[in-house]
Each structure stands twice: as C-alpha cells, then as structure tokens.
Image (cartoon, helix red, strand yellow):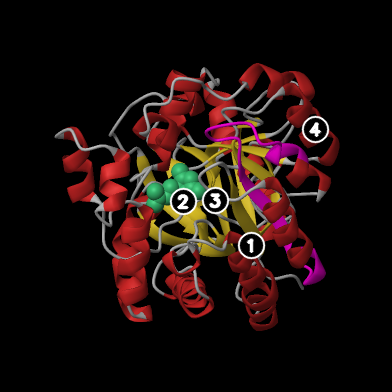
Amino acid sequence: MTCWDSIWTNARMATMAEVESDPYGVVDDGTLVVAGGRIAWIGLTEKFEANRFRDTPTHDLKGAWITPGLIDCHTHIVYGGNRAAEFELRLNGATYAEIAHAGGGIISTVEATRKASHDELLEQALPRVDHLAREGVTTLEIKSGYGLNTAVERRMLQAARKISEYMPVDIVTTLLGAHALPPEFTDNPDGYIDLVCQEMIPQVAAAGEADAVDAFCETIGFTRDQTERVFQAAHHHDLSVKLHAEQLSDLGGAELVAAYGGLSADHLEYVAEAGVRSMAAAGTVAVLLPGAFYCLRETRPPPIDLFREYGVGMALATDSNPGSSPVASLLLMLNMACTLFRMTPAEALAGVTREAARALGRQDSIGTLETDKKADFVVWGIERPGELAYPIGFNPCRAVIRNGVLVSGQV
Ligand code: DI6
Ligand code: FE
C-alpha cells in the first residue's frame, strides 16, 4: 500500500504551471498530497478522493495562497569582508578607478575571501541566506569567483554546498573562476584562462563541487575567445555553462553561450536581437538582475519586448554580491523587475519559480506545483498572487514547506 506523508488542503494555489489560460496556473480551492517529499496528487479539492488518503495527517491552509518555493538562480552570496566603506567613499566623490587603485573594488573582496577560512565564509554567508529563506526561497544558486585561484575557488564552492546543512534550502553551485583577473596575472590574462581550463575546471569537476561553469564576458572581464575556451573545458568535463553577458556592452556573449547550449545568459541589458534569436533557438533562459541595474544606476533596461517576441524565458535573481548588488531580498527583485523593467507581476513570479528552475536545469523537479515535483511551497498572507510584486519591504511569507515538511512559520 502506498504511504502518503501529508495532505495540505483548502489552499488557493498559484501553481505557476504553464497553461495558456492563466499566467499563474491558479487552482482555486486546491488540495495537495505529499509522498516521499514529492507532490503525489494536486488538484481541485472537489475532485480529491478523501477515501484514498484516509489516516494521512492533514493541514488546513484556511484559504491562504500558496506558490512554489522561490528560486534565486544567480547569487555570489559567499564572500569575505564587505564593501560598505567603498560605497561611502564613492558617495563622497571618489571614482571607481581611484578606489580600485587604492586596493578597493572586486579585488578587495578577493583579498578578504582569500584570507577567510571555510568556516568563516560559511558563517558570514548564513545570515544573508537566512534573509532569502525567510522570504520563501527554497533553492539558491551560489557562484564562486572571489578566490581566483584553485584552492580558494574550491573553498568557496565547498562552503556554499555546506549551507544546506544549516538552512532549509537546496544549493546549486557554479564555478565562476573567470570572474576577474587576479593580481598575479595582471599582464597575462590568457595564462589565467589556462589555469581555469587546465586546473580549476578539471579539479572541481573531479570532486563534483560544481553543477555548472560561468564566466564574465565583458570589456572589464574576459573576451569572447577567452570565454569560449572556458566553455570548451567545461563541456569536456560534462559541466553545463551559463554566462554573465552583455551587462555593460555587447560582446556577443549571448550568442556564444547559446551556441554551447547554455542554461542561461545573465544581465543582458545590451543584448541585440541576434543574441535574443540564438537564445530562443537554444532554449537559453534570460536571467535578469534588477538589483545590479539599480545599484549601478544603469539607464538601459534589458529588451523585455524582444524576449517576449521570441519566447525567451525570463528568470529573475538577486545577483547578491558585495559590489554591484548588495541585496538579500528576492521579493524586492519582483518589484524592481516590474517598476524598472516593466515586467508584469505574473512574469516576475514566473521568473523566480518556473523560469528560474529552467535557468538551473532543474525544471523536472522544482519551479511549479505539479505531480512528481518536490513538495517545496510557500504559504503567503496575500489576497492575489500578483501582490507579491507590489509592496516594498513587507514580508508576507507565513510558512515554508520543504520536501513536504513545515520548516518555518505556522499554518
Ligand atoms: N558582474 C557584476 O555585476 C558582479 N560580478 C559580475 O560579473 C560584480 C561583483 C563585485 O563587484 O564584487
Ligand atoms: Fe553576477
């Protein structure tokens, strides 16, 4: 006889399943049955055959809205130190270049990260992750990229993976060795790319420490050719790829990552139509990062209309990092995506559920409330799902259920 774990009934469900008629995939008055941490049955309460599930513990959600657990699919949330002093210096007139010359900027985070032990990196990341988790995030992608040598990149990935032992979140890790040029390689960027391809990627792949490989393809990062070498090494080691592309200029990164069947191209403020077309053909998701757009006071939003026209999926993430996006609220990103990029509230919610799952290649197990997916869901104190994108600084998260088990709040 099948064993059911629990029943969750009397819920208003924004399943986010892809259906023509309704962007939220709403099941008004729904019931959901959990078995083995997965959704064994979901549908209208009136179609629910209570007899089949007799003696299963039942939770009455009393008409509250639920959504899939939120997914933050692009963060740099593990790092040492912080850049608050630099923020203040800039507002007192110092330029980015002056700060960089004085040892500030991204390289100051690299120095602080190199000095931090595995446990220190973990301890510093946990409160940040806690903020995300309190807003209903149940899956979180974390990139390396502040070690810029093999030992510290691996330490970052190990600390990132460890977070799931302390917090009720699933962690997906990404090796971002090609994030910036470390000071040891100032005059030899190709030599650094050799290190990434010949040492970092093979070691990380052999140890199973990363789920994917990313790079920063930009005038202040790495060229298209250097990025392509990183992708070749990643594929050689059976790792999928994604890319920081077209954030500040158009280097053709979106086309490149699409040509390598990439999971996502991220930022994309400067992507041209050809890049969008190749992303559509490859099924590469556009990951939009309004926190970085806001903090850098960018003025050119990503081409939302082109993504819509070509049917490119749009995900949303915090880009949580100490420089360009010191953000620990995914709900705030929903609001900013609507206010700054003119996405609809339904697109924004899909961006942190269904589309974020696709950006991580996890669409078979998370991102929507459908049979056989993980029973990760959030109970909200809202009156309609679009409301999640509306307020700023309010947290309507009432409870989080992960693998069918209540991990925070009350129902
Ligand atoms: N793009 C960004 O906006 C961040 N990294 C990247 O590739 C910046 C990271 C930092 O300033 O620490
Ligand atoms: Fe980033």
Q: Can you tell me whether the CB of the residue at mark 2 lies under 8 Å from the nearest atom of ligand 2?
A: no
Camera-side mark, 3 or 2: 2
Residue highlighted by disc 3: 8
Mark 4 or mark 2: whose residue is earlier in sequence: 2
Crowding around mark 3 (Cα neighbors within 10 Å: few <14, some 14 to 19, many 20+) is some
Counting labels gives 4
Residue highlighted by disc 2: 137
Q: Does residue 146 appear left or right of residue 1 in this picture?
A: left
Q: Residue furthest left?
A: 92
Q: Which residues are magenta?
A: 235-255
The numbered dot on residue 280 is: 4
Residue shown at 82%/45% (left/top)? 259
Residue highlighted by disc 1: 190
Q: Are marks 4 and 3 in contact (CB under 8 Å)?
A: no
Where on the picture, by quarter, is residue 365? bottom right
Mark 3 or mark 2: whose residue is earlier in sequence: 3
Crowding around mark 2 (Cα neighbors within 10 Å: few <14, some 14 to 19, many 20+) is many
The three-letter code of the residue at mark 4 reads: Ala
Mark 1 or mark 4: whose residue is earlier in sequence: 1
Label 1 to label 4: alpha-carbon separation: 31 Å
Camera-side mark, 3 or 1: 1
**Residue 97, x across and y down, in percent:** 32, 42
**Residue 341, x across and y down, in percent:** 51, 21
Determine the secondary structure under disc 1.
helix
Where on the picture, by quarter, is residue 188? bottom right
The three-letter code of the residue at mark 2 reads: Val
Mark 4 or mark 3: whose residue is earlier in sequence: 3
